Image (cartoon, grey):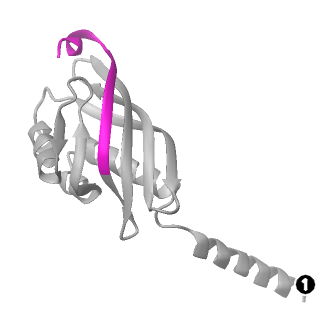
């Protein structure tokens, strides 16, 4: 009888844990960022498209240029594909906060752009995400350039 109660208790505990797992929790947002980094690394434009809101906004790190809309951003990424001089970019998440009321998340961290010759540019970023159909979609990213090395300081 004790074994039966223990098995039922363990089963119910697993069922409750599974039922309480949120599709748009902090872990899922961090996974979305990992998928974003992989899409950049792999030049996977289709994967980037799936992560971008239609009206996504990007504010660049040095000049504060504003790139608005999914297609405008995808055009920038397409231009990088196959260019031997393009930078490889990485965003490293430091903090994530989730709004339980509005289905929004904010992420902050450090970004780095690395040139094939080894020079780097980087700084801090903040990203706004929205939970849409149980998936995190990127709505905005703001970058601030804080450091550079070599030829990338001339950009």
Q: Nearer the viewer, residue 67 or 155?
A: 67
In percent of width and height, residue 83 lies at 10, 33
Q: Residues within 10 Å of mark 1 (few under 14, many from 20)?
A: few
Residue at 77 percent of width and 84 percent of height: 8
Which quadrant holds residue 151?
top left
> Which residue extends farthest right?
2
Residue at 52 percent of width and 67 percent of height: 22
Which quadrant holds residue 80?
top left
In percent of width and height, residue 86 lies at 16, 29
Q: Label 1, on which residue?
A: 2
> Which residue extends farthest bottom?
1
Report if residue 146 lies within the magenta region.
yes
Segment tinted magenta in the rendering: 139-155
Residue 7 position (above or below residue 118): below
Residue at 25 percent of width and 32 percent of height: 88
The quarter of the rendered structure image containing the C terminus is top left
Determine whether, in the image, residue 61 is placed left or right of residue 134.
left
Residue 69 position (above or below residue 95): below
Q: Nearer the viewer, residue 129 or 19?
A: 129
Report if residue 57 lies within the magenta region.
no
Determine whether, in the image, residue 129 is placed left or right of residue 153.
right
In percent of width and height, residue 36 lies at 32, 48
Secondary structure state at the residue bearing disc 1: helix
The quarter of the rendered structure image containing the N terminus is bottom right
Residue at 20 percent of width and 45 percent of height: 43
Q: Nearer the viewer, residue 20 or 39?
A: 20
């Amino acid at each position: 009888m004790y074994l039966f109660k223990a098995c039922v208790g363990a089963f119910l505990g697993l069922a409750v844990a599974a039922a309480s797992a949120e599709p748009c929790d902090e872990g899922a947002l961090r996974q979305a960022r990992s998928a974003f980094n992989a899409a950049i690394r792999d030049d996977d434009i289709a994967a980037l498209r799936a992560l971008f809101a239609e009206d996504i906004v990007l504010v660049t790190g040095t000049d504060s240029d504003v790139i608005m809309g999914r297609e405008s951003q995808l055009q920038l990424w397409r231009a990088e594909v196959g260019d031997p001089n393009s930078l490889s970019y990485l965003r490293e998440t430091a903090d994530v906060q989730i709004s339980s009321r509005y289905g929004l998340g904010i992420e902050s961290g450090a970004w780095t752009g690395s040139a094939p010759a080894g020079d780097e540019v980087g700084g801090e970023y903040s990203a706004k995400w929205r939970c849409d159909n149980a998936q995190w979609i990127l709505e905005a990213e703001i970058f601030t350039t804080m450091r550079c090395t070599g030829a990338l300081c001339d950009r």
